[in-house]
Image (cartoon, rainbow, N blue to C red):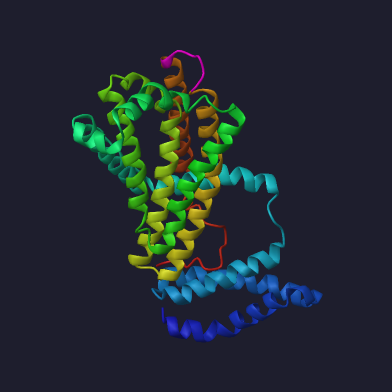
Amino acid sequence: MDVDAFVLAHRPSWDRLDTLVKHRRKLSGAEVDELVELYQQVSTHLSVLRSASTDTVLVGRLSTLVARARSAVTGAHAPLWSEFVRFWTVSFPVVAYRAWRWWLGSAIGFFVVATLIAFWVAHNPEVQATIGTPTDIDDLVNNKFASYYSENPAGSFALQVWVNNSWVAAQCIGYSILLGLPIPYVLFQNAANLGVSAGLMFDHGKGDIFLGLIAPHGLLEMTAVFLAAAAGMRLGWSVISPGNRPRGQVLAEQGRAVVAVAVGLVVVLLVSGLIEALVTPSPFPTFVRVAIGVLAEAAFLSYIGYFGRKAVAAGATGDVEDAPDVVPTG
């Protein structure tokens, strides 16, 4: 097919449809009928071009026109409840699922750094001396570490934890505007803090207390932070390497994906905060508290795996439906 001839023959119809869409609120009855007819015709034109043309700009512009025309023709929006359901069953899990490589990489890097620092601290008295005096360290491992989780009322502590964790996640997401370059440093800071605490606690024979207090909430909490880091770094990388699509389109898609992650993590971190405030300092046996944390983590990963895989199989990306800057590629 001669694409140039096809475009030349049908561009007047496209221009007319564009005009009708722009003035859709002032159309007469005949013009509304014309709008519907042109929408159907141009949709067919788009289908032909997608299979015959490699001009992504042309296909993208026509795709945008068809999306706008479809909105004008249907003139209806999905109920709020269906948008809510779609977010939790498609938008959020599919974005998290698609970012699993970045997510896993962040987790591995974090735990490698934390483990190395823990061993370094535990086996070097000189390093411990730079952290604090023997009295300070003794107070930390025997009193302060455990009392931190119970010295404040559960409600206010849960809010404090939620705000603190949300700030770390927000940093990871916000740094995406700097190509995600500062995100590894944010993860390193948190890994170093965890490693120092672990090294001191294990060196003083308090490893069981450390794990019993960290595991119930820490699994879900750190997973949320890793997901935030993954979304931020993935957005930054999309600027550097957009692939075979326009950089602006990829950046817009990934930007909307980051928003979906940010909204979803508000709830995930709230659950983590509640576990930290209510379960971690509770009088339950250690194995019960740890089991609750493991179940929460398993439930979250299963949720992402089930709905994310299902959404990917259905061709969903988590992007806004009919977003105006989504450019199909041939």
Q: In this rendering, does residue 6 appear at all?
A: yes
Q: Is residue 290 left or right of residue 132?
A: right
Q: Is residue 257 above or below residue 151?
A: below
**Residue found 35% across the figure and 39% down from its top:** 193
Q: In this rendering, does residue 294 appear at all?
A: no
Q: Position of residue 89 (x, y in %)?
A: 54, 42
- Secondary structure, magenta segment, majority class: loop
Which is nearer the eye, 88 or 71?
Answer: 88
Q: Position of residue 200 (x, y in %)?
A: 29, 28
**Residue found 40% across the figure and 26% down from its top:** 215
Which quadrant does the C terminus fall into? bottom left
Residue 148 lies in the magenta stretch: no
Which is nearer the eye, 104 or 41?
Answer: 104
Quarter-of-image position of residue 100: top left
Stretch in magenta = 281-286
Residue at the right extreme?
A: 29
Q: Position of residue 8 (x, y in %)?
A: 51, 86
Q: Position of residue 117 (x, y in %)?
A: 25, 37
Which is nearer the eye, 78 or 283?
Answer: 283
Q: Is residue 160 above or below residue 246?
A: above
Q: Is residue 46 above or below residue 142?
A: below
Which is nearer the eye, 226 or 133?
Answer: 133
Q: Is residue 45 above or below residue 210?
A: below
Q: Is residue 194 left or right of residue 92?
A: left
Which quadrant does the N terminus fall into? bottom left
Please tell me how many numbered marks the rendered image carries: 0
**Residue found 53% across the figure and 26% down from its top:** 151
**Residue found 69% across the figure and 70% down from its top:** 36
